[in-house]
Amino acid sequence: MAVEKKLQEKILDAYPAKVMRNRKKHILIRESGEKQEIAANTRTVPGIITNRGCCFAGCKGVVIGPIVDMVHIVHGPIGCAYYSWGTRRNKGKARPGGKNFLAYSFCTDMQESDIVFGGEKKLMRAIEEAYETFSPRAISISATCPVGLIGDDIHQVAKQASQKLGIPVLAFSCEGYKGVSQSAGHHIANNKLMAEVVGTGEMEDKKPYSISMLGEYNIGGDEWEISRVLQKIGYHVITTMTGNSVYDEISRAHQADLNLVQCHRSINYIADMIETKYGLPWIKVNFIGIEAMSKSLRDMARYFGDEDLIARTEEVIAEETAAVRDEIGSYKKMCEGKTAVLFVGGSRAHHYQGLLREIGIDTVAAGYEFAHRDDYEGRDVIPDIKIDADSRNIEELDVRQDDKMYRLRLSKEKYEELQKEIPLGRYAGLMTEMKDGTVVVDDLNHFETEMLIKALKPAFFGSGIKDKYIIQKMGVYSKQMHSYDYSGPYAGYRGAVNFARDVAAGIHTPAWSYVTPPWKRQPSLVGKVAEEGA
Amino acid sequence: MLSYTPKEIKERKGLVVNPAKTCQPIGAMYAALGIHRCLPHSHGSQGCCSYHRMHLTRHYRDPIVASTSSFTEGACVFGGKANLSKGLQNVFAIYDPDIVAVNTTCLSETIGDDIGEIIRSTEIPEGKVVIHANTPSYAGSHVTGFANMVKAMVTYLAEPGEDKNNTLNIIPGFVEPSDMRELKRMLALMGTPHILFPDTGGVVNAPMTGRYEMYPGGGVSIDDLKKTGSSKATIALGSFASRDGAYELEKKCDVPSTVLKLPIGIKAADAFIMAVLSHTGGEVPTELEFERGQLVDLMVDVHSHYHGKKAAIFGDPDTVIAMTEFVLSLGMEPTHILTGTPGKEFEKDIEDICREGKYTPANVKSSGDLMEMHQWIMNEPVDILIGNTYGKYIARAENIPLVRIGFPILDRVGHSFFPTLGYMGAIRLIEKISTAFLDQHDRECEEEDFELVM
């Protein structure tokens, strides 16, 4: 722990006083005996090289963009549509007779005259042209920074367009400057899906073990691998939110009997709101890693409490784990004893720790870009979280029990009894996963990344594209955990093997042995070569 | 793939589908990286900076570091002055660059922040420099942003010199670090003293040494930027990306300028050499003449691979203009030509080139998008598509090869290391075009037509 404490001091010492006071609250060394509080979901200090994105990225980029049969129109200058086109690896397939617009990017491409005179007419025109050309199931409008500043009423335009065209048109006021990170955009997206989509779908024939998978974006095909296993057990997946989803499936989300929450940060709002409105509970799942996957499957079976389902679950777990055990074992031999840093996602920095452990790698530092305190400390802290001005601007929907469609899945007694065994409506947070002496950092920045690597010398750094090559230049293998470096799936049993194989390859690829040229390894030079990070 | 794109072309007035351009700030950020020890700073929401860094990083597979003013809703209401002032002070205290290059965004432009005033009223550490360019995302394109930042380098830094020296300023345009290195190599062969700016060589294609350098060795120095005002002339390559900087030098420091096409292909490379010669006199070194001869030799030897083939070309205007001229010189037919960047002179330049090449293209457009390009191809098929990575959807839909050139290339490597400018660059492009045709033939031809020697 001494190293970590010194690291913390060294980082903070390098900062100007005000920055130091700010960052101090975002960095802690794990001590399980103490109740530890971390500052999160607060403004990044200007000038700091943060990895954070914006509200638009969280709304259109993360939550709305993956819905495959909608035309997602970005209202603004061209950049935001361009950068969010095909860059997130949320895979999707058209349903029979349906459409898939994931290969397309749609934008109003606002020009100076639109900024001066307003862009509502152009937006209306864009919606009409999209409808005439593509006749999608529904259309979304995502606002970029200037839209809110000039006061375009995108909600009015959406309403008019919807009436005129007879298809849903959803407007998202997700201007980039709202909130302090992508997180505000997740919330805005959740609100609109809840208010205008969920609950509008026609009833399907009731199927047993109907579930929905929330906060799963089908990166690299994750959802397909998870669904393969769920279907094998006998579950009926009504919808995902929102990887590989289609509008009509989301509209029927209220008909499930259980919601699974994978990415807590981006989707917990809607899980809560659906429970309040329709009586449909959620459990926190983790489909990353063999143990976590099996535990989540057992929790689900326990929730339904059906003996056949429980037996079938055990059968599938046995079958699936047996199929991957040897291969995982071989990668474990290659990775045993190494350490990792994880800085990713709205649950991933938590989820991947288990899988890394399964291949012998301990996580020594972890954190998130856009998480809130509950993602670190667990949902029990939610009542204690102070709402600041930035969060207050993000609407909280007033959701109430739906008189017609509310259906209590569990009695209060049963709910409380189950809560003792499974994470029903609960999430304990990232920090419970982390051993004493490990480092937890919120909104990790460029400078701190360098310091972490120098002090901890990890073998693996799971993060994003912006810091990947910085880390690798320091001699440490870095994997983009948002895009899996274009590999995957990583979820589920087969995904775990893919991940293990990729990590083992990344750590052991022969290239690392050539970093120092032979002429710098001459005996006469020993002791003069700066070694850093490697 | 792209199966909902209708063949029938209808005019669209509100909707851009699959853009062929992006916004100004990313171009400004890229240009700024071409100054030694420069940290680009994005004055806007965090997301802008994040998106630009991500896209540049994907293209170069190298660290792209930049800071941001991290706007919140409050900053939008009260103005971004506090964010920029404090941001700059933090940047110098923590990251210690020699120079910060601020670009604006559609956010800070819409609320009307006066960046020059904010910089002047901010305490900047002794010996450090801050420059800025206005780069509103709702005008022009990423190429405009690049041009604006190059111009800002001149506006802020170039110092008028009474006595002009023998040096040539070269503005290379929005090209690869490998291209910038190639230009310097050619100039060195010609013995021409030069200042090339911006110069991202060694910055965005830095070597692996086991040590991370936040400010790698490459980039034009601030001193050299100051000296550009004493050079005898400026050669600006690519009118869209480089002309503004050259004209600013002419206006501010009385340095005469010549605007040329990007030296892609034999004609444009010849024009570049001739322009340099016109300023320096002397003779072209045998090495360059040798390379030129190799290029012509190859053009004769393998013309059968591509002569008479129809090409669709899209991307940034300077690249597309020069590429159009090149494919004509290869005996190919540039059938559809499009850029997303606005500017009527693009159409005029293409028309002039095609007239000279005695060819009438089917479609030429600036401010276009890739859906329209796809529709043109559906209506009049071509044999090959030449453009950036975004062309891959069309290439797959129409089963034609894609030769990747320009920005961005997100799915292949090589562009950071091997030039497409100059004679050697032209040889590389011929290799790519020829290989693309032959690979497709080998993959798809009947077995009895499969041949060993081609």
Image (spheres, coloured by chain):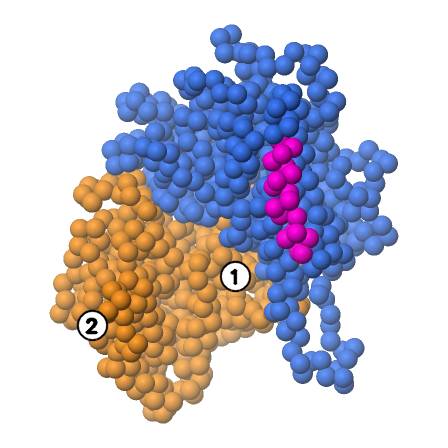
Chain colours: A blue, B orange
Q: What SS does tag 1 mark?
A: loop
Name the residue tied to disc 1. B61
Residue A440 appears in view: yes
Q: Nearer the viewer, residue A51 or B116?
A: A51
Q: Nearer the viewer, residue A87 or A93?
A: A93
Image quarter hosting the C terminus of chain B:
bottom left
Residue B254 appears in view: no
Q: Nearer the viewer, residue B179 or A98?
A: A98
Asked if both marks, 1 and 2, belong to the same chain, the answer given is yes
Give the main secondary structure of the magenta stretch.
Answer: helix
The percent coordinates of residue A129 (x first, y second) are: 26, 35
A181 is within the stretch colored magenta: no
Q: Which chain does the residue under circle 1 lie in?
A: B
Vertical arrangement, residue A253 with respect to residue A448, above or below: above
N-terminal label among 1 and 2 = 1
The percent coordinates of residue B191 (x first, y second) are: 43, 87
The percent coordinates of residue B164 (x first, y second) are: 42, 80
Q: What SS does tag 2 mark?
A: loop
* Amino acid at dot 1: Arg
A315 is within the stretch colored magenta: yes
The residue depicted at 57 percent of the width and 46 percent of the height is A494
Please identify the residue farthest to the top as the structure is shown.
Answer: A403
Q: Which quadrant of the figure has residue A127?
A: top left
The residue range painted magenta reads: A313-331
Q: Which chain does the residue under circle 2 lie in?
A: B
Name the residue tied to disc 2. B307
Q: Nearer the viewer, residue B79 or A229?
A: A229
Report whether B73 appears left or right of B425.
right
The residue depicted at 75 percent of the width and 22 percent of the height is A420
